[in-house]
Image (tube, helix red, strand yellow):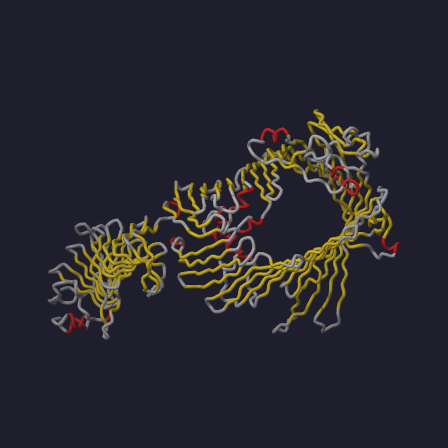
């Protein structure tokens, strides 16, 4: 027997004398304690010099199949048996060879068989201590009993082991490890709960883990707190592969809708095509006769672009026994493409459109907002900057769609060419010329719209100021946007070109004033114009379109002058408020625009409009893409006064130094109006006022705006009826005060909670987005929707440390017509959450329409933190989207399909 210690990697100056040692015949049953295991060992061997027990390192040259350096160490002792070619390590021992490391209180190295044996040792109370921990590369095995490992073949037999597999833990009574890293477990279980006694696990008699691919099990059962449940399957597959390489089956969810009945939804397959493109194809089927197919794809090329493409097709035919027959074919398409900023060109896309029947009949459980939204828009854009020149261009394909009116508008294409502002006189000292700048913008559009203009008769909207004679305007005719109607839609397409030439100059006047002089030239090009004529036989005004190239040019000029005025009010010494500052910024401007409806310009046509012989000037370009030249001369003086009021408040401080804080009393108070000297009546425009401020340390924000009409009103008898209308005289001259408030709004929003760190939904959204991007994630539509859902749903993002939180809003709107009819609308909305305990929380989202006297969309939810599980209960008790759902799911992302869910929706569009 040879026993020695090497403190500095060198041979010691004195080796202990070799002594005979009787070791057990089987290393499968290691001794419990060194002093009881080695009865024949002389006492002197246990009295080794202390300095020889501190460190041990043995570096063995290549022997046989050993390919690299072997290091081992033991805190208590190292015993070498040359007769059996074995080494015994005791107490806090470790063994390293290549990428493997073994830690245990008892290790036996068998050089002849290239094997390791490891186990723990029992202490004086009989408790096993120092059980093995085996590491091979990134894999870690926590061994409860013992193990054998062949470091030549990399195979192992382990008793009672726990190992980490991605986000889960694998445990088995007997485990065999293959040379490729795969492990085979007998009577094993899988869980993502990291407790010693997990809340749940999957139990199976046979489990195989293939490193870097998946974990496969035979028949398994789901256990809760050690209690078996009837939930299970004949086999299970859990991915252990990087997300960018995972393909597999997508399991469906189930539930019920009132119209389409019971359903199986989102059953399909996920295709990890390559490192750049992923796609999934899913289907769904309903018990009352409907089905659907979806495809969703995401793509990403690093440093170039990323995006997603989704298509959803739904078909439904209600059974013959249904009281109300429903049939529809519906689809929806979404496409987003975002490039990385590089080079001098850029292509992006955001498409979101489909059929009206889709939004009316297909319930979006994960996105109620889509069902409530009536307007959708899409845009595909390309832009390019011409390096070395002031020019840039962009081309867009735009789409807008209104689900209420069925109106669809396509801009195919929308092209723009722009020249950046140029300073041709920048080297001249005279400031007005030095700052003179000029730019040029060009736009061209082709618009396809299913709002059809009738061939005969003029839209009453053209006859301004004649609502009393002709009544309310008729709604435009809407042609269904289908492929069959496409030829007519193309014939009705509108197109046009627009040039704008803005010229401006900034300079200082009389030291304290800033002046801005500007002039804008606009020219429109059209390929047709309108010719109006009165049809006496039908008693109506008709029009015809005259083909040919037409130019419409107009211009205006303006001059603005602004300054800043500061006022201070200081309080006596010792007052909590030290001072109040008032900042006022008045702006005065004068603008001039000629009357382009004058016949000499040719932009308007004077024509008879009714059987009475009344004549009126109408624009020859009414309803065109860019409209026509403005009507009426304008020489207007505009006044705008902006005010900011702040207070400097003394703050309490523990130090002798005085600390102050600025508090906004009025963040803004704006007053604006203008006076048109060229108008023949009603020269003074309504006075617009708005103010914004915050209260209670920014807990509540308030915004108020109002529109004051300074003119008086009078009563007239028209066709035997008394009507109220405006009079061309100021209200104060008629004893009617300063005027009439025609419209007013007030928005009050706030957030209350006992914590100063509670985040708003916007702050939560920004934080989640930044964290996701900083961790190397790529933004897709799915990711963005998930972030929005978490930020807006209190049950998904809960700060359990805050006992309660509430956000609220109050909106008031007032409108008064000249006829005296007034309309007031009010609405209150609120949301928040309340903690019942450290693990229970109730959240809610509701509102009340004061004008209608009804409760708006309401959701009540319960959230429960179950350590490795999360339970969410959401209930929409009434309304169009009445439904409930209960989800109890594992928190691990790789087991997001392992859940107990029950959903029911009473959504009915009829």
In the foreground, 100 or 780: 780
Depicted 781 relative to depicted 745: above or below: above
Q: Look at 47% across and 44% down and name the residue there.
A: 319
Q: Look at 54% across and 38% down and name the residue there.
A: 346
Residue 844 at x, y percent in the picture: 54, 61
| Residue farthest top in this picture | 548
Residue 828 at x, y percent in the picture: 63, 60
Q: Look at 44% across and 61% down and name the residue there.
A: 871
* Left or right position of 212 against 255: left
Residue 406 at x, y percent in the picture: 60, 40
In the foreground, 371 or 360: 360
- The quadrant in which residue 162 appears is bottom left
Instruction: Let me know if residue 563 appears in the view.
Output: no
* Left or right position of 262 against 501: left
How many discs appear? 0
In the foreground, 417 or 811: 811
Residue 378 at x, y percent in the picture: 57, 40
Depicted 910 relative to depicted 565: above or below: above
| Residue farthest right in this picture | 733
In the foreground, 674 or 725: 725
* Left or right position of 686 against 343: right
- The quadrant in which residue 540 appears is top right
Q: Look at 87% across and 50% down and name the residue there.
A: 729
* Quadrant showing the N terminus: bottom left
Instruction: Let me know if residue 826 appears in the view.
Output: yes
């Amino acid at each position: 027997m040879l026993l020695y210690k090497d403190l500095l990697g060198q041979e010691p100056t004195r080796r202990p004398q070799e002594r005979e040692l009787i070791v057990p015949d089987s290393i499968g049953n290691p001794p419990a304690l060194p002093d009881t295991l080695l009865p024949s060992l002389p006492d002197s061997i246990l009295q080794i010099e202390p300095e020889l027990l501190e460190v041990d390192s043995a570096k063995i040259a290549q022997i046989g199949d050993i390919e690299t350096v072997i290091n081992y160490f033991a805190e208590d002792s190292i015993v070498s048996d040359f007769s059996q070619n074995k080494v015994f390590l005791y107490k806090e021992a470790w063994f390293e060879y290549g990428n493997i490391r073994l830690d245990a209180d008892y290790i036996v190295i068998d050089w002849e068989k290239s094997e390791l044996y490891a186990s723990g040792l029992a202490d004086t109370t009989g408790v096993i201590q120092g059980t093995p921990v085996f590491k091979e590369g990134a894999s870690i095995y926590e061994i409860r009993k013992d193990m054998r490992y062949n470091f030549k073949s990399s195979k192992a037999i382990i008793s009672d082991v726990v190992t980490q597999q991605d986000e889960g833990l694998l445990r088995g009574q007997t485990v065999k490890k293959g040379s490729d890293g795969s492990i085979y477990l007998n009577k094993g279980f899988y869980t993502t709960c990291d407790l010693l006694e997990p809340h749940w696990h999957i139990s199976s008699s046979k489990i195989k883990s293939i490193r870097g691919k998946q974990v496969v099990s035979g028949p398994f059962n789901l256990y809760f707190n050690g209690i078996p449940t009837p939930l299970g399957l004949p086999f299970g597959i859990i991915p252990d592969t990087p997300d960018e390489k995972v393909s597999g089956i997508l399991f469906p969810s189930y539930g019920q809708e009132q119209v389409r009945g019971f359903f199986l939804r989102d059953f399909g397959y996920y295709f990890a095509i390559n490192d750049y493109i992923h796609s999934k194809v899913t289907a769904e089927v309903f018990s009352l006769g409907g089905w659907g197919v979806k495809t969703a794809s995401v793509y990403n090329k690093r440093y170039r672009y990323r995006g997603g493409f989704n298509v959803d097709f739904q078909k439904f035919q209600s059974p013959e026994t249904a009281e109300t027959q429903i049939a529809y074919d519906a689809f929806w398409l979404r496409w987003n493409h975002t490039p990385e900023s590089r080079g001098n060109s850029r292509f992006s896309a955001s498409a979101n459109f489909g059929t009206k029947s889709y939004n009316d009949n297909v319930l979006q459980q994960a996105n109620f907002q889509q069902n409530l939204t009536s307007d959708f828009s899409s845009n595909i854009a390309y832009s390019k900057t011409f390096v070395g020149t002031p020019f840039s261009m962009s081309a867009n394909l735009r789409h807008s769609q209104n689900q209420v009116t069925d109106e669809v508008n396509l801009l195919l294409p929308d092209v723009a060419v722009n020249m950046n502002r140029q300073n041709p006189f920048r080297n001249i000292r005279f400031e007005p010329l030095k700052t003179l700048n000029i730019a040029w913008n060009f736009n061209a559009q082709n618009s396809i719209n299913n709002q059809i203009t009738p061939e005969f008769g003029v839209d009453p909207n053209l006859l301004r100021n004649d609502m009393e004679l002709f009544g309310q305007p008729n709604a435009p005719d809407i042609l269904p946007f289908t492929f069959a109607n496409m030829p007519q839609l193309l014939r009705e397409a509108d197109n046009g070109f627009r040039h704008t030439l803005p010229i401006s100059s900034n300079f200082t006047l009389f030291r304290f004033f800033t002046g801005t002089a500007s002039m804008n030239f606009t020219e429109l090009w059209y390929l047709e114009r309108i010719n109006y004529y009165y049809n006496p036989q039908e008693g109506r005004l008709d029009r015809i379109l005259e083909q040919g190239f037409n130019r419409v040019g107009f211009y205006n000029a303006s001059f603005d002058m602004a300054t800043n005025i500061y006022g201070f009010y200081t309080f006596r010494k010792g007052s909590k408020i030290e001072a109040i500052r008032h900042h006022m910024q008045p702006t005065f401007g004068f603008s001039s625009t000629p009357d382009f409806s004058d016949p000499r310009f040719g932009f308007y046509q004077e024509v008879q409009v009714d059987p009475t012989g009344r004549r009126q000037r109408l624009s020859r370009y009414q309803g065109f893409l860019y409209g026509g030249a403005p009507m009426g001369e304008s020489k207007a003086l505009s006044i705008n006064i902006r005010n900011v009021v702040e207070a400097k408040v003394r703050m309490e401080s523990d130090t002798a130094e005085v600390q102050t804080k600025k508090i906004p009393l009025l963040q803004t108070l704006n007053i604006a109006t203008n006076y048109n000297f060229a108008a023949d009546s009603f020269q003074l425009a309504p006075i617009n006022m708005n103010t914004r401020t915050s209260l209670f340390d920014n807990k509540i924000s308030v915004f108020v705006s109002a529109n004051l009409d300074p003119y008086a009103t009078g009563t007239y008898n028209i066709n035997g009826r008394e009507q109220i209308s405006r009079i061309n005289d100021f209200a104060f001259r008629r004893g009617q005060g300063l005027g009439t408030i025609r419209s007013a709004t007030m928005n009050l929003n706030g957030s209350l909670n006992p914590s100063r760190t509670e985040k708003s939904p916007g702050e939560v959204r920004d934080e989640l987005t930044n964290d996701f991007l900083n961790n190397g994630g790529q933004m897709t539509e799915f990711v963005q929707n998930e972030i929005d859902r978490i930020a807006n749903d209190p049950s998904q993002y809960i700060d359990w440390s805050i006992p309660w939180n509430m956000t609220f809003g109050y909106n008031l709107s007032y409108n008064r017509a000249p006829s005296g009819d007034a309309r007031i609308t009010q609405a209150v909305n609120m949301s928040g959450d309340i903690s019942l305990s450290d693990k229970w929380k109730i959240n809610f989202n509701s509102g009340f329409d004061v004008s209608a006297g009804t409760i708006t969309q309401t959701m009540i939810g319960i959230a429960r933190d179950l350590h490795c599980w999360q339970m969410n209960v959401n209930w929409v008790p009434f309304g169009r989207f009445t439904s409930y759902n209960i989800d109890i799911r594992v928190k691990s992302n790789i087991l997001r399909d392992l859940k107990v869910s029950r959903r029911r929706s009473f959504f009915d569009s009829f």
